[in-house]
Image (tube, grey):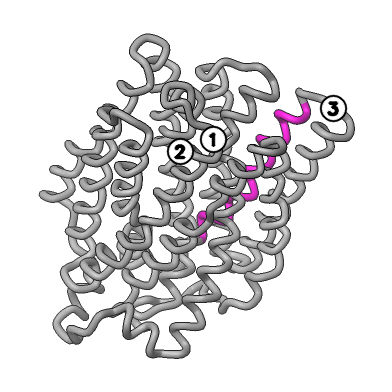
Amino acid sequence: MLNFLAEPIMREFNVGTLEIGFIFSAQYIFCIFGAMLFGEMGDRFGRKNALILSILWVAVFSVLSAFAPNFWTLAILRLISGMGVTWGLAFTYMSEFYSPKRRGLFGGLIHATFVFGFILSALSVSLIYPIYGWRACFFVTLYPIPFLILFAKYLPESRIWEKHSAEMDKSLRLAEIVRESRYLRLLVLATFLFWLAEFAYHAIVDWSPTFIIRQFNYRPEEASMIVLRISLVALIVLPFFGLISDYIGRRSSFAISASIGLLGCLMLAYFTLVNYNPGLALLSLFVIPIGFGSHALFGVWSSEMFPTKVRATATSVIFSIARGLSVGGLIVGYVATFSSLLYGMLLGGIAFLLMCIFPWLLPETKGRELEEF
């Protein structure tokens, strides 16, 4: 939601790209604390309850953003709401249900559901913002609550967690991961690789609406619809790369996706800076999201690296640190204060390049049976 509303929020509170970039990045930093809290709850008390509580947390603190009287109140509310963004819990839950034969595909399908939130955000801005302003758009963030009631009643708990929960010790799961050198190495390498992907994502996607507005003179509601169409690419890309990872492996799929993202960045630079062509520059923004097909593998791959007793904590911490410390939005916002948004966004291309290299340092986990692991 905030990505689409950056321009009117900056105008109302009289702040610049650096301040809004701070919110883009800082709200994800607080994901790290949420991952420790809700990940620990997921390993101790079950995946289902921790997941429901984390979503409720996001919904409540997001809607409060509509009442922020000033910029820093808005920033604090976004930071607190960020604690509930614990995708690692969802992927842990999913990975323990599906067989390894199609786990990558289902991981891609589930990750692609973020697009529906993106669509809802874009539609909210396009339909609500021109009439009622940016504050009214945040009331849409209450939509998960009826679903949470249904989940609480009908969603089953993970059988794998139930099987092993009685024999698990009561020590802090993160402390156990840090003590075990093999777990710690996996944690560090996976976090760095996924951090590169998150840096590229937030450097480019967070600022795409503002870039389109400034570079091509579109109105906010027009830019939101363009970005909406761009986001629809993910509905195909994420399940596709999840599926092919079930055949060719997690590492190869990750590297192939990243190489296409790198190509998109090179196209954006060429058709904006060298041979100016607005149509092809916009087309490159449809190519770059193919590079985010790697995101389909985050939860599946990381959950396959760790045993049941620490899986929710490890997967949540990896994803949340990678996302929380990505600072792509903040760095691009800083660069834009003395240069252009484009130069900052193109830093994502360097991340894509490294994403082609680092997957090979992690183990291939395609086909791993979690219950036996």
Residue at (49, 73) in percent of width and height? 367
Assess disc 2: are there few (<14), some (14-19) or many (≥20) residues with their C-alpha within 10 Å of its C-alpha: some
| 160 and 175: which is toward the camera | 175
75 left or right, relative to 42: right
Q: Which mark is residue 115?
A: 2
Q: Which residues are magenta?
A: 280-297
Assess disc 3: are there few (<14), some (14-19) or many (≥20) residues with their C-alpha within 10 Å of its C-alpha: few
Q: Quadrant of residue 223?
A: top right
Residue 168 seen from this side: no
State which tag comes first along the sequence, 1 or 3: 1
Residue at (46, 69) in percent of width and height? 302
Task: Return the x and y of residue 52 as percentages of the image width and height.
Answer: 21, 52
Q: Which mark is residue 255?
A: none
239 left or right, relative to 114: right
Was residue 5 drawn as part of the magenta stretch in this picture?
no
Count of numbered marks? 3
Task: Return the x and y of residue 368 as percentages of the image width and height.
Answer: 45, 76
Mark 1: which secondary structure?
helix
Mark 3: which secondary structure?
loop
* Front position among marks 3 and 2: 3
Q: Locate the C terminus and report the quarter of the image it occupies.
A: bottom left
Residue at (63, 70) in percent of width and height? 359
Mark 2: which secondary structure?
helix
Q: Quadrant of residue 305?
A: bottom left
State which tag comes first along the sequence, 3 or 2: 2
| 369 and 86: which is toward the camera | 86
Circle 3 residue: 276
Was residue 290 drawn as part of the magenta stretch in this picture?
yes
Q: Amino acid at mark 3?
A: Tyr
Circle 1 residue: 231
Q: Where 141 sits versus 352, above or below? A: above
